[in-house]
Image: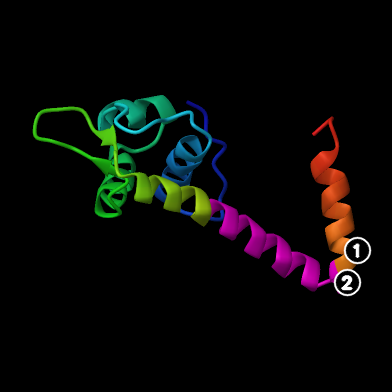
Amino acid sequence: MKIQFNNREPVYIQVIRYFKEQIATGQLIAGEEIPSRRELGALLKINPNTAQRAYKEMEEALLIHTERNKPSRITFDQDILDAIRSELIHESIDTFVQSIRSINVPLDEVIDLMKQRYNKEDN
């Protein structure tokens, strides 16, 4: 488990994003056990309270569930899992569109360049 932390966002947000990315790419699957809060803190070298906050947020979003005295697990709810993928795609597109608009690139040119880059084999 590796996360490259940045200084722009709170660490717990970056931890949540990591889990979402792992789910969206199939690295974590429905029902899979995830490390305990304490284990996560040790693995990522973050404060255990930060790990706790990330888990609390993920539980509130129904991304994970924890039963008493059992490990936390990724949700089985396929609607939530699908929504995670969609959320990540839309966030990426919004960020890209905002940056490309700021330099006034015509949409046709953006689409052509995107097709070229997306289909390039050495990505």
Residue 64 sits inside the magenta stretch: no
Q: Return the residue found at the far left.
A: 68
**In terms of image quadrants, where is residue 121?**
top right
Which of the labelled discs sits on residue 47, or is there none? none
Q: Residue at x 71, y 60 (%)?
A: 96
**93 in magenta:** yes
Q: Which residue is mark 2?
A: 106
Q: Residue at x 84, y 50 (%)?
A: 115
> Residue drawn at (84%, 45%), measured in percent from left and top?
117
Residue sitting nearer the eye, 55 or 94:
94
Q: CA distance from mark 2 to mark 1?
A: 5 Å
Q: Which residues are magenta?
A: 88-107
Residue 78 pos. (x, y %):
35, 44
Q: Amino acid at mark 2?
A: Pro
Quadrant for residue 81, please give it. top left
User: Which quadrant of the figure contains the C terminus?
Assistant: top right
CA neighbours of label 1 inside 10 A, class few (<14), some (14 to 19), many (20+): few
Instruction: Look at the numbered disc 1 and give the secondary structure of its residue.
Output: helix
Q: Dots 2 and 1: beta carbons under 8 Å?
A: yes
Which residue is depicted at the point 86% across and 74% down?
Answer: 104
Residue that badge 1 annotates: 109
Left or right position of 7 against 102: left
Query: x%, y% of residue 39?
Result: 30, 25
Residue 70 in the figure: left or right of residue 8: left
Q: Position of residue 59 (x, y in %)?
A: 25, 48
Give the left or right position of residue 105, taking residue 101 as reference. Answer: right
Label 2 crowd bin: few (<14), some (14–19), many (20+), radius 10 Å: few
Residue 14 pos. (x, y %) = 47, 46
Q: Amino acid at mark 1?
A: Glu
SS state under label 2:
loop
Camera-nearest residue between 12 and 111:
111
